[in-house]
Structure formats: C-alpha cells, structure tokens
Image (cartoon, helix red, strand yellow):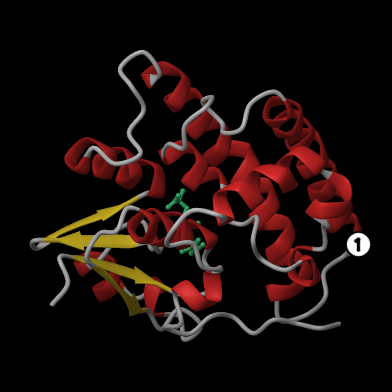
Amino acid sequence: MSHYKLYCIGASGNAYKIALYLNCAGLDWEPVGVEFAGGVTRETNWRADMNIMGEVPVLEVAGKRMSQSAAILLWLAETTGKFAPTQDERFEAMRWLFFDNHKFTNNYAMHRFQNCLTPQPVDPAVLAFLRSRVENTFAIADKHLAERPFVLGETVTIVDFSMAGYVYYPATETGIDIAEEYPAIDAWRRRLAALQGWKPPYDMMPVGTSPRVRTS
Ligand SMILES: N[C@@H](CCC(=O)N[C@@H](CS)C(=O)NCC(=O)O)C(=O)O
C-alpha cells in the first residue's frame, strides 16, 4: 500500500494540485477514486469519515486525513522538504496561496464548471460575470509571471503546484484559451510541464467519477 493516498477525481483541479506535487516530488502515492458524480461527498457518512467540508481532495497519511489543498501542500512541504519555500519566502508563499484559493483557481474553476460541467447550459450572464473575474485575476498573474520563471522567483515551490491546478484542462472545457490570451501564464505552465513526473490531470488521476462534460 502506498504511503500517501489521495482521494480524488480526474476533473478536480484542486486534487490535481496535490497529485502533481506528489508525482513531481517522487513520493510513494496512489490516487483513490471518489464517486463524486454519484453525490457521495454530500453524504453524511462520507463527511463524517472523510471530510466535514464535503470536498475532494483528501490526503490520507498513516491514518490521518487532511483536506484543503493549500494546507496539504504546506504540510507536505514542511514534512518532506520538497518544493518548500525558504523561511524568507514564507510570507510571500502564503500571500499567493490565499490569492490562488480566493481568486486565481476559484474564478477559473467556477467558470469551467459553469461552462461545461452543469447538467444544462447556464445563463450567458453568469459566464460573462465569471469571465470578467478570471480576466482580472489572470492579468495580475500574467504580469507577475512575465518577470520571473516561477511564482516565488527562480525556484519551483508548492505555490506553483497550487496555481497550476486548473491550467492544464483543455480550453474546450474551461472556455478560456490560456495559450492565446495569457502568454506568461502559458510559458510558466510549459516550464512546469517540463518537470520530471509531470502528467496532465486526467492521466494523473484516472479514477472515481467526474461530472459529465457538456459539449453544448
Ligand atoms: N479550497 C478547497 C477547494 C476544494 C473544492 O472546491 N473541491 C471541489 C472539487 S474540485 C469539491 O469537492 N466540491 C464539492 C462541493 O463544493 O460540494 C481546496 O483547495 O481543496
């Protein structure tokens, strides 16, 4: 049995943050599928046993279960030393992790969900609102990444894995073409994709049940 068990689904970019970290760090891990599309994360027992917050990812290590990708990444960096920010970088790491959770990942993931994962097409006004939030946030990250190879500077850290959660899902799902619209984010994600251990999300987590991707 692997040391790290990641409860996840292919469609979850928040889970991908952890999967990508574990694989690039060369750690002994396995993805464990969650029946997400069947609604298991809403069940009382699942919440009691796995995560009171009703979300994936959950990381299990030696009987301990943890949720919230940023908290998990911080814990992994502290316990393994891999891709850890230096002491001097700690404040900056937290700043970008909060920015990622509140805006960078959140707006993009919401836009993708409404674009292709809801059972029925949504009101175009909803997509327009979320797109404007993504544009604002991605412009900030694009400017930042135009001036340095990785989020904290010269070295890959957990912050890069956090912000990379959704950037490899196809533009047909997200409805936003990073390669076309955000050249610095595109160059950054290609630098990360050159890391040993990198794989795209659905290859990294071919488990569980994800919501069906709508094509119209
Ligand atoms: N801030 C959380 C977000 C986790 C999250 O939103 N997970 C989604 C899948 S990507 C989920 O399980 N959603 C279920 C729900 O909101 O009911 C993290 O970083 O782990």
Q: Element at badge 1?
A: helix
In this rendered view, identify the residue nearer to me: 28 or 132.
28
Determine the residue located farthest toward the left in the rendered image: 62
Above or below, 164 relative to 140: below
In the image, what residue occupies the spot 76% across and 82% down? 214
Task: Give the residue type that dot 1 points to.
Answer: Pro
Left or right of 77? Residue 208 is right
From what the image shows, is residue 37 above or below residue 148?
below
Find residue 96 and report its horizontal and vertical position in percent: 53, 29
Quadrant of the image containing the N terminus: bottom left
Report the residue marked by disc 1.
124
Q: How many marks?
A: 1
Report the side of 174 relative to 204 (left or right): right
The residue positioned 51% from the left and 41% from the top of the image is 160
Rendered view: 190 above or below 119: above
Q: Nearer the viewer, residue 89 or 128?
A: 89
- Where residue 11 appears, as percent x and y from the top left, is 55, 72
Q: Give me the residue at 48% from left, 34% from top.
A: 97
Residue 185: x %, y % from top left: 72, 42
Q: Is residue 47 left or right of residue 90?
A: left
The outermost residue toward the top is 88
Q: Position of residue 129 (x, y in %)?
A: 84, 47
| Above or below: residue 86 compared with residue 129 | above
Mark 1 C-beta closer than 8 Å to ligand 1: no
Quadrant of the frame with the C terminus: bottom right
Label 1 neighbour load within 10 Å: few <14, some 14-19, many 20+: few
Of residue 22 and residue 215, the one placed in the foreground of this image is 22
